[in-house]
Amino acid sequence: MPNHVSCEKRLRQEKKRSARNHYVKMTINTLAKKMKSDISIEEKEQLLQEVYSRLDKAAKNHVIHKRTASRRKARITTFFNAQNAEQKEKK
């Protein structure tokens, strides 16, 4: 246990921040998993915009690194484009 008031405050702050950051990260992971589920291309296109937005906000608020956000966006976009091309080939 901390002996100083400032250390106690720091623990309270870290607890709040870590809970907030965890929520943001889990939301991003959930959206990424939804992209890989069996939903229509139109729904995936809307979901792609939401994933972009969430990743950019997380990077802006230093929850994740900006290059991590960029890499994840690139990978999700590659996956989406492959699914889209596959869908067009079937038609």
Image (cartoon, rainbow, N blue to C red):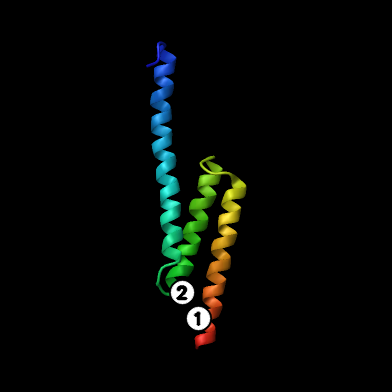
Identified at 50% across, 61% down, the residue is 49
Q: Report the Cα–Cα distance between label 2 and label 1.
A: 8 Å
Few, some or many residues within 10 Å of mark 2 (<14, 14–19, 20+): some
Q: Work out whether residue 40 or residue 37 is closer to the camera in this orientation and state it.
A: 37
Percent of width and height locating residue 61: 52, 40
For the point 60% across and 60% down, the residue is 74
Q: Position of residue 28 (x, y in %)?
A: 45, 53
The answer to which quarter of the image holds residue 15 is top left
- Numbered circle sitting on residue 47: none
User: Which residue carries the number 1 mark?
Assistant: 87
Residue 76: image location, x then y, percent = 54, 62
Q: Which residue is mark 2?
A: 41
The residue furthest bottom is: 91
Q: Residue at x 42, y 75 (%)?
A: 40
- Using residue 88 as the reference point, say whether residue 26 is left or right of it: left
Q: Position of residue 56 (x, y in %)?
A: 54, 50
Q: Does residue 90 appear left or right of residue 9 in this picture?
A: right
Circles 2 and 1, Cβ within 8 Å, touching? The answer is yes
Outermost residue toward the right?
67
Element marked by disc 2? helix
- Which is nearer the N-term, disc 2 or disc 1? 2
